Image (cartoon, grey):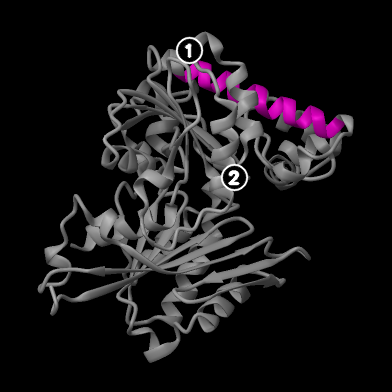
């Protein structure tokens, strides 16, 4: 392997108010991409750089970068994702050699619509086609596309690959995918459930396989500012809480989740609002923020003692419990329950409160293990190769195992892009 080709992959995840950014190395065989061993690729990707920017467009911006020998963090505000991406690339030295050092730039795209059920190697005509998906995920897809365009300009020699969150849910059966509206709308306009957070769910499925944990009926709760739940049977998605857009499902940081479908029409009349204004309310002014009237930040909410903050948390937890019960019924039982995502893996309080409402399923939390897992993941260092045992912490003692798992969407994006071009 001394003369093996070293492949460098940049993995870019542009969220609604954040950017996560990692660089991985893979030492392939002598033929480069053609000799990638797909079963072990996830383990052999080596993270050499990790970076994140949070709270873009606010006065609470934060920048963090970590390399082999040093790390740096500071409060730093950016007006938009474009400014943040240019700063990251310049700061981390990826302008070096005109970007030739990077072989693959792998981008997370939230919504693949009807077109994309596998990764896409971007060519000239694809940008326009990708832009047509913006309306399906208005908080994310336009930013995913912006990231693609900027990185394509900065790193012109790199192969640009898109990996889609919706792809994992292509297995959802038609009876679960369809909405009970005239079926012609599905055939004419492709209106049905697409689901999201699929890259995270793919990673969870893969890391469990590698760890030798085989569960036939698995429920995974990906809980962050955006939140969803997925029912996984024999490794494939059979249902998930988000739908045609990421607005459906759980109550989230700023999204309403499921509401009476007549309410948008009623709000439009009551507020004398344009349709776009109501859509903005449901996507950006609802959820934890709308009920608490203070913040969508879960860490801040659990510290607050006012009645609206407490109400917001109670509503949030109640809806998670309801969906878990619903999907346990869909799976005809439950073999394991997983919490992941920024809130799911880091908050012992959240896991404790949710599991307290699931004793009928055989779920019971171990308070010491639960608290220990939260502290561990809050200080988790993803640098280097993936830590299989360290990514999974069992936090339950009941008949149904409960896990907190550190999801790694960036390494999954790199892994899927790498295998796609092999």
Q: Picture coordinates of residue 237 (x, y %)?
A: 36, 31
Contact flag, marks 2 and 1 (Cβ < 8 Å):
no
Give 314 or 160, whichever is nearer the viewer: 314
In the image, the segment drawn in magenta is 308-327
Q: Picture coordinates of residue 299 (x, y %)?
A: 72, 44
Q: Quick one: SS at disc 2? A: helix
Identify the residue position indicated by label 1 in the image: 362
- Is residue 301 in the magenta section? no
Q: Can residue 269 be seen from the camera position used here?
A: no
Q: Quadrant of the C terminus?
A: bottom left
Crowding at dot 2, Cα within 10 Å, few <14 / some 14-19 / many 20+, comes out as some
Identify the residue position indicated by label 2 in the image: 375
97 on left or right of 259: left
Q: Residue furthest front?
A: 368
Q: Picture coordinates of residue 238 (x, y %)?
A: 36, 27
User: Residue at image x 89%, y 33%?
Assistant: 306
Q: Nearer the viewer, mark 2 or mark 1?
A: 2
Q: Between disc 2 and disc 1, whose residue precedes?
A: 1
Give 187 or 151, whichever is nearer the viewer: 151
- Is residue 316 in the magenta section? yes
187 on left or right of 311: left
When the figure is inspected, residue 80 is found, relative to residue 218, above or below; the finding is: below
Q: Quadrant of the N terminus?
A: bottom left
User: Residue at image x 53%, y 35%?
Assistant: 228
User: Residue at image x 10%, y 72%?
Assistant: 31
Question: Picture quarter containing residue 176?
Answer: top left
Q: Residue furthest top?
A: 360
């Amino acid at each position: 392997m001394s003369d093996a080709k070293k492949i460098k992959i940049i993995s870019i995840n542009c969220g609604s108010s954040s950017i996560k950014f990692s660089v991985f190395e893979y030492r392939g065989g002598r033929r480069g991409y053609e000799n990638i061993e797909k079963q072990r690729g996830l383990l052999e990707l080596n993270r050499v750089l990790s970076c994140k920017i949070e709270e873009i467009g606010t006065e609470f911006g934060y920048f963090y970068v970590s390399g082999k020998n040093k790390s740096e963090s500071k409060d730093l505000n950016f007006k938009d994702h474009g400014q943040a991406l240019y700063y990251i690339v310049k700061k981390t030295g990826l302008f070096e050699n005109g970007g030739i050092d990077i072989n693959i730039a792998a981008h997370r795209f939230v919504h693949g619509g009807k077109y994309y059920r596998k990764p896409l190697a971007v060519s000239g005509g694809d940008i326009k086609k990708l832009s047509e998906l913006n309306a399906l995920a208005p908080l994310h897809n336009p930013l995913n596309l912006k990231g693609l365009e900027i990185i394509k300009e900065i790193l012109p020699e790199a192969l640009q690959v898109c990996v889609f969150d919706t792809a994992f849910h292509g297995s959802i059966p038609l009876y679960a995918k369809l909405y009970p509206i005239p079926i012609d709308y599905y055939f004419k306009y492709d209106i049905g459930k697409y689901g999201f957070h699929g890259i995270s769910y793919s990673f969870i499925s893969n890391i469990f396989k590698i760890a030798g944990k085989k569960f036939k009926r698995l429920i995974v709760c990906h809980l962050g500012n955006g939140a969803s739940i997925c029912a996984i049977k024999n490794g494939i998605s059979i249902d998930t809480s988000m739908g045609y857009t990421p607005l459906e499902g759980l109550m989230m940081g700023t999204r309403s989740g499921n509401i009476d479908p007549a309410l948008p029409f009623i709000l439009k009349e009551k507020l004398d609002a344009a349709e776009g204004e109501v859509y903005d309310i449901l996507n950006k002014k609802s959820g934890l923020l709308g009920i608490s009237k203070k913040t969508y930040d879960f860490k801040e909410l659990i510290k607050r003692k006012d009645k609206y903050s407490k109400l917001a948390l109670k509503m949030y937890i109640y809806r998670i419990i309801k969906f878990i019960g619903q999907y346990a019924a869909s799976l005809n039982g439950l073999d394991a329950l997983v919490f992941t995502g920024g809130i799911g893996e880091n908050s012992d309080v959240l896991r404790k409160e949710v599991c307290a409402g699931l004793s009928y399923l055989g779920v019971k939390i171990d308070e010491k293990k639960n608290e220990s897992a939260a502290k561990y993941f809050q200080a988790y260092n993803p640098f280097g190769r993936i830590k299989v045992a360290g990514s999974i912490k069992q936090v339950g003692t009941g008949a149904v195992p409960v896990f907190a798992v550190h999801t790694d969407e960036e390494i999954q994006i790199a892994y899927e892009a790498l295998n796609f071009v092999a």
